[in-house]
Amino acid sequence: MDLEPVITAAFGYVRDLLGQDSGGHDPEHALRVYRNTLRLAGAVPGCDRQTAALAAILHDADDHKLFHTENNANARVFLNAQGVEPEMADRICGIINSVSFSRNRGRAPETLEGKVVQDADRLDALGAVGIARTFAYGGKEGRGMEDSIRHFHEKLLLLKDLMNTEEGRRLAEERDAFLRSFLEEYLRETGEI
Ligand code: NI
């Protein structure tokens, strides 16, 4: 099945579903993860570009931070309405479910598509966009800036060593370096160093 029309429809779907989010899981995040996925998939032989791309756009459609759905209900209802066969929907949901760090307790995804989409999502947690998203999420959850700074140390600075693909690691290193220089300047301005 050619998934290209489903991919196009998925942009509209997440625009409606995530359009109200102010905590860094907005439709623009889905779009960036999609773009990162295409870039990484091109460098990973054997990775199915279309399933990875579709999983990338839908990866937050049932995120437990945002929704209380079971068994990827949002993604499944959308895919079913698009005429995607149940086996393909299972595959796409399997990729989505392998991407979340907390859900898998740090275990790496088994499929190439899962590895690519996970890297693509992690790249969006690093660099200038990663910084902006961290503070946006913290603010939405009512947390202070120091909590967001702690999140950099507890999670974001670990990501570059957890990347699955070579190209993902290379891009993560660039964005990680930017993050570290931001933190250094932050500490300087707050008088902590
Ligand atoms: Ni995400």
Image (cartoon, rainbow, N blue to C red):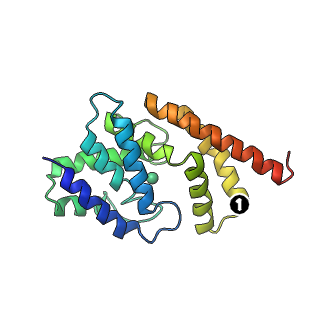
144 vs 114, left or right, is right
Q: Residue at x 45, y 65 (%)?
A: 66
Q: Position of residue 77 (x, y in %)?
A: 23, 63
Secondary-structure class at tag 1: helix
For the residue carrying disc 1, how many other residues have a C-alpha within 10 Å: few (<14), some (14-19), or many (20+)? Answer: some
Picture quarter containing residue 29? bottom left
When the figure is inspected, residue 93 is found, relative to residue 115, above or below; the finding is below
Q: Residue at x 43, y 51 (%)?
A: 32
Q: Residue at x 20, y 51 (%)?
A: 4
Picture quarter containing residue 72? bottom left
Q: Position of residue 149 (x, y in %)?
A: 69, 52
The three-letter code of the residue at mark 1 reads Met
- Image quadrant occupied by the C terminus: top right
Q: Position of residue 88 (x, y in %)?
A: 19, 47
When the figure is inspected, residue 75 is found, relative to residue 3, above or below; the finding is below
Can residue 163 be seen at all in this image of the molecule? no
When the figure is inspected, residue 24 is found, relative to residue 86, above or below; the finding is below
Residue for badge 1: 145
Q: Position of residue 154 (x, y in %)?
A: 64, 45
Can residue 176 be seen at all in this image of the molecule? yes
